[in-house]
Image (cartoon, grey):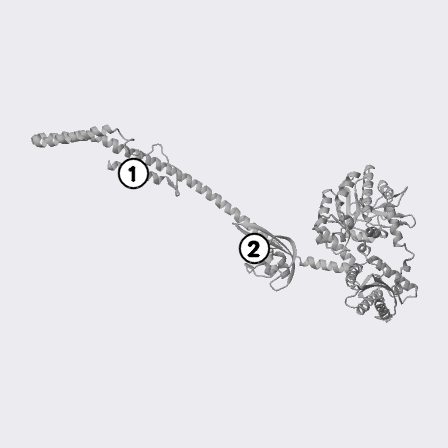
Amino acid sequence: MLLVQDSAHKQKKLTEGMAMTNGNPTQFKTENQLPILSSSSQSPLWLLTIVAISIFTSEIAVMIAFVWLPPPTVQMGVILDGVLLTMLVSPVLYLFLFRPLNVHITALHQAQDSLQQQRDHLEEEVQKRTAELIERNREIADREVHYRAVVEGATEGILTLDKQGLIVRDNTAAEKMFGYDPGMMANLPLVQMLTPDSAKRCLGSDGLLYPVSNLSLEAQNKGGKTIPILLSISTFKYENDHYFTAIIQDISERVMFEKRLARLAYYDSLTGLPNRRLFHDRLGQAMEHAHRNGKLVGILFLDLDHFKDINDTLGHLFGDRLLQETAKRLSDLLRKEDTVARLGGDEFTVILESISNTADAEDIAKKILHSLRQPFNLGEHEIYVTSSIGITLYPLDDNDIERLIMNADSAMYQAKLHGRNTYELYTSKMLSETIDRVALEKSFRKAVGASDFLLQYQPEFVLHYQPEVDRYSGEVVGAEALIRWQHPELGMLGPDQFIPLAEATGLILPLGEWVLRTACMQAVAWRAAGLPPFHVAVNVSALQLKNRNIVQQVAHILKETGMDGRYLELELTESVVIDKSEELITILREFKEMGITISIDDFGTGHSSLANLQLLPVDKVKIDISFIRNITTSKQDTAIVVGIIEMAHKLGLKVVAEGVETEEQLMCLLSHHCDIMQGYHFSRPVAAENFEALLVNRVEVTPRNQSHQ
C-alpha cells in the first residue's frame, strides 16, 4: 500500500512538472489521465476485507499446525498456505500495484510523445520567428543605410536634438557649415550656435526649443563667423522620449544676391547715389521725422544747364564723368543726415532734413551753385557748367511726396526761365497752368456719383485694353483693363492724373468696383461673340483690399456677370503685399479658391524680395516699366530684370514684362526667357471694340511683327 501511494505521489509530481512550459503552467492532458488512489476510485472494500480475513485465517491455521500437528504435516500446511497466499495476493498485487504502474508508464510515454511534439512545434516556431527577425533586422539595417546616405548627402545641416536641445546626431553638411570635426558637435546645445538674438527667437517661455518653420536667423560657426540661415525644427517621439529634428539651410549666397539686387535697385550705377526709388523712401522718412519734431524738410530739384551740349560735343563718356564729379561735389556739401539722389540724366534731388526755415534751404542752394560753377577737370578738358535749382518745403507747400517733387521741378524750370545759374522758391502761381486740385476733385466726385459713372449718354469713365503676348506662341493670352477719364473740359486723362486723387478721397472704392464689373462684363461679351478665352487683368488698390467685403464683392460680381473666375486676374502693387499680413494672405487664398489668378504689379519698385513671395499665393510678377525702358542700355537694369526672371522661375512664378516698346527690348527679354510681354511694341491700350477687332481680324501680334493695330 505504501508503494502504491508513493508511486501515485511521484506520478502526480511528474504530471505537475510536465505541465510547466517556459515557466508558465499549462493544462496538460493525455488520453489516460493518471489515476489518483482513493477509496472512491479503487476496487470495492469488500474484496480487501475477504483477502485480509483469508490471510488471517491461513496464518491461524499455520500456527495451530505448528502446535498440534507433526512436522511433515506442518511442512505440507506451510506449503499449502504459501500457495494459497500467493493465489490470494497475486490478483491483489496486479490490481493494486502492477496495473496502476502500467497505466502510469503508458501515460508517461504519451506525455513524452506530446512533449516531443510540442518541442518540435516550438523549434519550428522559433526558427520561423528567428528568420523573420533576421529579415526584419536586415530591412531595418537597409533603411538605416539609406537614411544615413540621404542625411549625409543632404546639402542642409540636419541635427537630432534631445528635449534639452543638445545635439545627439548630426550630418556632414552641419559639421562643415559650423566648422566642426566629425563627432565634435555631440552634446553641444543648438542655441550655442546661434547669435543671442536668434537664440531667443527659438526658445519658449520655459527656455526650451519649440517647433518653427523656415525661420530666418543668424548662426555662428566655430570661428565666430556669422552665417545667415533658415531654421526649421520639428518634434518626434522615440522610446517614450521626445526629440527634435533641426534642418538648417545656409542662405549666405541668397542674402548676398538680394543685397546686390537691392543695391542695383536702389542706387544709381553711374554715380553710386540713391536713385528715384530710394529717394522716395528717404523723403517719406524725413517727412515723418519732421512731423514729429515740428521741423521743415527742404526738397531741392536741380539739373545742369546745357548738359546736352556737352554730351553732343564731347561725347557721352565725358558726360558721364561730369555727372560723377557733380555727384561727388554735391555729397561733399551736404550734412550726413541729408540725401542727394540722381533721378536720371542730369537731374539731381536733395533732401534737407530738419531745417528751421526757408533761409536754411536757400543757403544750401547758394553753396551748390557756387560749387558747381568751379571748373571740372576731365582729363584734357576743363569744363565750366552752371545749374538751375528749384526749392519746395514740407509741410508749407504740400504733404504729398509726388506733389512736392513736382513743385520743386516747377520751381527749377522757373529758375531756367529766369536765366539759369540760379534758384527759385516754389509758389502756387507756378502751377497756374494746371488744374486746381479742388476743382479737379469736385469734377471727379461729380463723375463718380453720376448714375453709375454715366453722364447722360456719354460715359466719363471708359476702359481701354492692352494685350499681353505669350513669348512661345506669339498669341494674345491676356488683356489688362486700364481706366481713362473723359473729362468734359480737359479731354482724355490717364490714370496717373486722377487715381492718386481717387485714393486720397476714398472714391477709389466705388471706382474700383465699377472697373471690375465692367471688365468682367466685357470679357463675358467677348466669349459670347466666339472669341477664344483669355485672362482679363484688373488692378486692385490697397484701399480696396482693406475693404472687409472685398471677397464677397468680387464673388458677387463674378456671379452677377457670369464671369468664370479662371479668366480673371487681379493685379496688386508690390507695396500692398510687403507686410504679408495674415488678413491679406487669407483674402488672396479666398480669391485663389475662386480660380482667380494673382499677380504683383510694378515689381522691383518696392522693398519686398522674391523670396518673400513664396509665403503668398501669387502666380505672376510684372516687372516695372522703369527697368524695361533701359534694359538694352543699362547693365544695372539688365541685371535686375535677369535676376527677377531667374528667381521668379525658381519659385514657379510666371514673369510679365511691361512697357516693351522696341525690337531690341523684345529680343533681350526673349533671350532671358521672359514668359509674357506687354507694351507699345505690340499695341497701345485700345477701346474694347478695337481690341475685339484686333482679334477678330486675326492681326498677328508676334515677337517678329512690329505692326500695331
Q: Tell me the distance, in whole angstroms, between the alpha carbons under discs 2 and 1.
A: 64 Å
Above or below residue 399? Residue 146 is: above
Earlier in the chain: of badge 2 and badge 1, it is 1
- Residue 354's image quarter? bottom right
Please give left or right for residue 447 compared with residue 226 in the image.
Answer: right
Indicate which disc residue 622 carries. Answer: none
Q: Nearer the viewer, residue 596 or 157?
A: 596
- Rate crowding at label 2 as few (under 14), some (14 to 19) or many (20 or more) other CA atoms within 10 Å: many
- Residue 33's image quarter? top left
Which quadrant is the C terminus positioned in? Answer: top right
Asked if one can make out residue 464 in the rendered structure from this viewpoint, the answer is yes
| Residue picked out by circle 1 | 9
Which quadrant is the N terminus positioned in? Answer: top left
Residue 316 x %, y %? 85, 63
Asked if marks 2 and 1 touch (Cβ < 8 Å), the reply is: no
Q: Nearer the viewer, residue 141 or 528?
A: 528
| Residue picked out by circle 2 | 161
Secondary structure of the residue carrying tag 1 is helix
Please give left or right for residue 118 compared with residue 145 in the image.
Answer: left
Residue for point 34% across, 38% down = 15
Residue for point 91% across, 60% down = 429
Residue 631 x %, y %? 80, 56
Taking the view exactly as shown, the residue that stands out farthest to the front is 294
Residue for point 75% across, 56% down = 607
Please give left or right for residue 550 compared with residue 683 in the image.
Answer: left
- Residue 477's image quarter? top right
The amino acid at mark 1 is His
